[in-house]
Image (cartoon, rainbow, N blue to C red):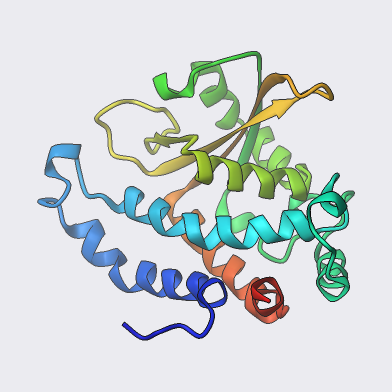
Amino acid sequence: MGNPRNYSLELPDRCLELLDGLWDTVARDKKLGARHGGPLSTTFLLSLATPIVVLPTERILKQHPIVEGSADDWHLDQQLADRLRLSFTSADPFRSCPFFSDSDGWSYARHDGHHNFARGIPNEVAAELAKPEAKDAATKLSAVTAIQGLRNALAHGSIAYLNKDGSGLHGSRAEMIAFISERRDKGGEVVGYHVLRISEDGFRSFLRRWVDWLNDTGLSQALAA
């Protein structure tokens, strides 16, 4: 393996190359995932998405001037802060971000109260995500909420595999993914959940756009500094 000059700088690119280069092999290998009900393509996708999204997002959320408490955690790099301001502000919706595309098929729903998502996605949430309004809700979701939600879901494994209809039926082939993150009140108590849903293909497209954004803006180098 080639020795990277900077691990955090090159990792998203390397992981994306692995994802694209090996996707067809993993998706077609039914023997590899036989005891799990099918190919391990979703597991492969999420395994590589975690470093692609989580490592850069750790720095983005701690360096972004709009994130509450960021000044307490890090000495703010002014150049990086300026670049992030050009990408999105606290008032910007998810759809305004360079890495968002309607063609990816994001849907969003809120769930109030407590639920153990390890037992499956609630029927009412699955039904809400299937409505046309859920796609519109995703476009209007705060960019920071969307990024934080993806980061938290990937980092903590708060993810639901869904079938082509958006239901979390055990044993069926996964074709969609739901990313679940906590909603908290001002006192820090969990009051519900954010749920972002996207298809496998849509999420792969998002990851390419995300890595392109990091590279095109120079954020990948600034974040690795």
Which image quadrant: the N terminus? bottom left
Is residue 106 in view? no
* Residue lying at 51% horizontally and 45% vertically, measured from the top left: 154
In the figure, is residue 55 to the left or right of 159? right
Rendered residue at 10%/51% (across/down): 31
Label tally: 0
Q: Residue at x 83, y 63 (%)?
A: 75
Q: As rendered, which of 133 and 172 lies closer to the eye?
A: 172
- Camera-side residue: 93 or 186? 186
- Extreme-left residue of the structure: 31
Compared with residue 101, is residue 111 higher up or lower down, i.e. above or below?
Answer: above
User: Is residue 181 shown left or right of residue 11?
Assistant: right
Residue 10, image x, y percentages: 51, 77
User: Image quarter for residue 149?
Assistant: top right
For residue 136, say whether it is visible: yes
Q: Where in the figure is residue 203, as x and y percent of width and height?
A: 50, 55
Q: Quadrant of residue 44?
A: bottom left
Residue 6 in the image, given as x and y percentages of width and height:
54, 80
Residue at the extreme top: 113
Report the residue at 16% width, 57% height from top.
Answer: 29
Could you tell me residue 141's position as x and y percent?
A: 75, 42
Quarter holding the C terminus? Answer: bottom right
| Left or right of 69 on screen, residue 43 | left
- Residue nearer the viewer, 175 or 2: 2
Left or right: 118 as drawn, with respect to 115: left
